């Protein structure tokens, strides 16, 4: 199994041939936010909204990278979602153009 997919991440599902994994830092971040809510430093609504926005934005970014790689003739087998950004390794044709287009979508 690829090192990207089995180190420090938990499988949360599979869709269209792509394994989606959640990096262990996401639950740890949620725990930290929960502790901040319990210490009355932040309201529960703001904490939940912030975590959801973070998770959705990282997920959307990686979905767009995966779709772009597929349209350029490649495929992605694993996506790892982390609070500092997602990580995927699209397998692309050897031509420079697909690599350039996927790189322009955003960094890994």
Image (tube, rainbow, N blue to C red):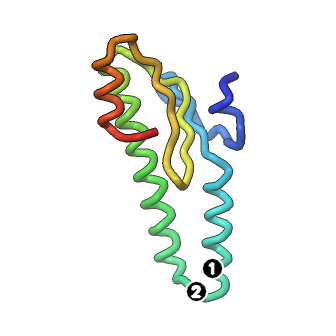
Residue farthest along the top direction in this orientation: 94
- Against 16, residue 44 (above or below) is below
**Residue annotated with mark 1:** 36
In the picture, which quadrant includes the N terminus? top right
Q: Residue 18: x percent and y percent?
A: 52, 27
54 with respect to 37 (left or right) = left
Which tag, 1 or 2, sits closer to the chain's start?
1
Residue 41 circle label: 2
Residue drawn where x is 29% and y is 28% of the image: 101
In contact (CB < 8 Å): disc 1 and disc 2: yes
40 with respect to 74 (left or right) = right
Residue drawn where x is 61% and y is 80% of the image: 37
Q: Residue 36: x percent and y percent?
A: 63, 79
**Label 2 packing within 10 angstroms: few (<14), some (14-19), many (20+):** few
Q: Nearer the viewer, residue 16 or 58?
A: 58
- Secondary element under disc 1, as helix, strand or loop, is helix
Residue drawn where x is 40% and y is 52% of the image: 57
């Amino acid at each position: 199994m690829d090192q990207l997919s089995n180190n420090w991440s938990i499988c949360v599902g599979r869709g269209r041939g792509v394994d989606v994994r959640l990096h262990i830092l996401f639950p740890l971040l949620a725990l930290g936010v929960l502790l901040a809510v319990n210490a009355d430093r932040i309201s529960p609504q703001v904490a939940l909204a912030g975590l959801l926005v973070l998770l959705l934005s990282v997920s959307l970014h990686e979905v767009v990278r995966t779709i772009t790689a597929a349209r350029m003739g490649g495929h992605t087998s694993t996506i790892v979602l982390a609070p500092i950004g997602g990580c995927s390794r699209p397998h692309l044709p050897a031509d420079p153009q697909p690599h350039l287009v996927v790189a322009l979508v955003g960094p890994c």
